[in-house]
Amino acid sequence: MKEITEHRLLLTEICSQRLSKSSTGRAIRADKYGRGDRMLSSHSVIQRAVAAFDSLQERVILTRISEHPDSRPQKGFHMLSSCCRFTLAFALVLCGRASIVSPLAAAERPNVVVVFADDWGHFASAYGQLRPGTINDVVQTPNFDGLAKAGVLFTNAFVNAPSCTPCRSSLLSGQYFWRTGRGAILQGAIWDAAIPSFPLLLEQSGYRIGSHGKVWSPGSPANAPIGARRTAVNFAGGRFNDFSEELAKAPDPTAVKEQLLEEVRQNFRGFLKAADGRQPFLYWWGPTNTHRTWIQGSGKKFWNINPDTLQGRLPGHLPDVAEVREDVADYLGEVQALDAGLGALLQVLREDGLAQNTLVIVSGDHGMPGVPGGKCNLYDLGTHVSLAIACPGRIPGGRVVDDFVSLPDLAPTVLDAGGVPVPDVMTGRSLWSLLQQSSGGQVEAGRDSVLIGRERHVARARTDLLPYPQRAIRTRDYLYIRNFAPDRWPMGTAPGFGLPEGPMPAKEQLNASTFAAFADMDASPTKAWVIEQGLSDTEWRPFLDRAFALRPGEELYALKADPDQLHNVAADPQFADVRKELSERLLEALRASGDPRVAPGPEPVVFDQPPFTDDADNAAGKAGQKKKAGKKTGNENAPGK
């Protein structure tokens, strides 16, 4: 035991020397790379390190005694030498020269499966049971619902940014998207390898990691935060991402549907079979079928979703007309395909005996694409997403939780579950302790709001390549939005909307090409209908203006009276105190997090300068576009796939 004591003291000394090089001994400020946002005393760091050492050496002793109750002295000496070697390893970690070592034994660390879908918002039948009268009455997601029942269903989960790449940057880094460098934009995004990501931290701690589908893109290198091509999994192909297209061209759609689900199973099984069975694993499945394009009429044809059942249930931003109802029904068909794929993954976990010790997280990267108020907007239709988390052996199930969750919270949650130290740079707040409680409703009083924002989506949406900068705070009762450049067009320019007056592109072009007009909204039948009818019929003009016209510098929505966020009360004297309070609260939080958009000083905001405003080489759809197949509902060259 003397040797352990000596090495414990040595560890303390190493920690002290390491910290003294970075600070005066009072505090360290970690930036987005792990050097800033929170203050942590040197004494606290030393205490953590020594406590981890004590915990591990005690675990080693107990393990050796249980395995070798008649151990002779030389075995005990070998055990102590292992602890000595751990001292050196831990010191190297502190010096940035070695991988993180988890204090948890491999058998105690849960496997992790993340299902993260493109463009999937707050749409699941489990939510329809909680709040009838919406399109969630129509969609059927039995696998998501079953997972939620076995674990926790979150009712107030929101993305940090309603655009593919910045949302994923925030999730993978556990930080607000505005802290992720060029990961904060979509076209022109580049991942900064110096920013910690939770998948790679898991890998460094002993996890085996792999992914199939979309993790982080568009951007370069694609899927970098999970190891890019090095950890890619593709044992059976990726036809699932073209779900309705594959069914539409098949003589037997039912048989092809089963083939696509088997593809999901075989990709996952291939990943599992390639492992040695002793490592915990992280497997990420990123389907993109819910991202446009899809086959017009596929919702009814392949999933028996009658568009007429949506009448009276559409979100308020959408015209309740036949063309739009069919478009939404097709989208919900893709959601049901996603749910079937989730069921295929869960089947593999059950059959392989892994379900009990696997943490499963299911969500999406923002709301419905190609519709007013959806993707690329800070209204709930663009930012509110589904979220269910289950781990039968560790998380009490059958709960509905109303705490506000921002998707960056998932990064520290997974690290906590795996016993991996959470970098102080992460602004996300771990849900792990909340998940292990048995209560529902509002569990932690402090989780009462989320921050949301947006910078550049499509590079050429505006002629000057500038973003449409927005930040918002969403609470239970209000949504407050600050539009920092109200003179810019929120969804991009078009003839008569920032461009010279002239004819709008034809309906067929608006349905087929995102870049024909208002390029920050994906091409779709809904987009084409709103533009055509809004310009020609005064009855529908409010839908056009709400979607594409200039917006004021401030927006405020009182959610009890206006759940769809259609009536801006920011200028109403009745809400002046609320507006002032939320504005101050938002700006204070942005400044505390180091948001460049509110940085002090006369210098131009970095997001309004190169390289954030570089032309992305007109990268229209270069990142993994779907192949053409049959009559498709727009977006042939959308940027987000």
Image: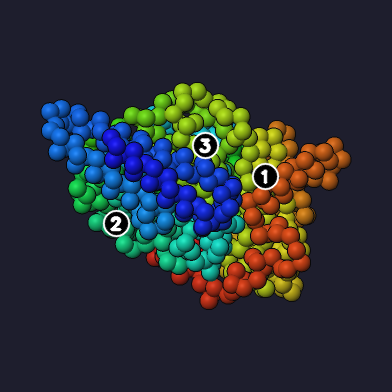
Q: Residue at x 24, y 40 (%)?
A: 80
- For mark 2, give the secondary structure: loop
Q: Where in the figure is residue 539, as x and y percent of width and height?
A: 74, 51
In the image, which is nearer the foreground, mark 3 or mark 1?
Answer: 1
Q: Secondary structure at mark 3?
A: helix
**Residue depicted at 39% across the width and 39% down the height:** 52
Specify how the rendered protein is coloured.
rainbow
**Viewer-nearest residue: 261 or 271:** 271
Q: Residue at x 19, y 36 (%)?
A: 76
Residues at marks 1 and 2, CA–CA distance in whole angstroms: 38 Å
* Residue toward you, 421 or 444: 421
Vertical side of 625 occupied by 107: above or below: above
Q: Which amino acid lies under the numbered mark 3 shown in the image of this protein?
A: Asn
The circle drawn on residue 233 is 2
**Residue 136 numbered mark, or none:** 3
- Could you classify mark 1 by the number of other residues whose Cα lies within 10 Å: few (under 14), some (14-19), or many (20 or more)? many
* CB atoms of marks 3 and 1 within 8 Å: no
Tell me the kind of residue under disc 2. Answer: Val
Percent position (x, y) of residue 26?
A: 59, 47
Does the rendering let one see residue 549? no
Q: Could you tell which of marks 3 and 1 lies nearer the N-terminus?
A: 3
Q: Which residue is mark 1?
A: 473
Q: Amino acid at mark 1?
A: Ile
Between discs 1 and 2, the one toward the N terminus:
2
- Residue 502, visible in the rendered structure: yes
288 to the left or right of 619:
left
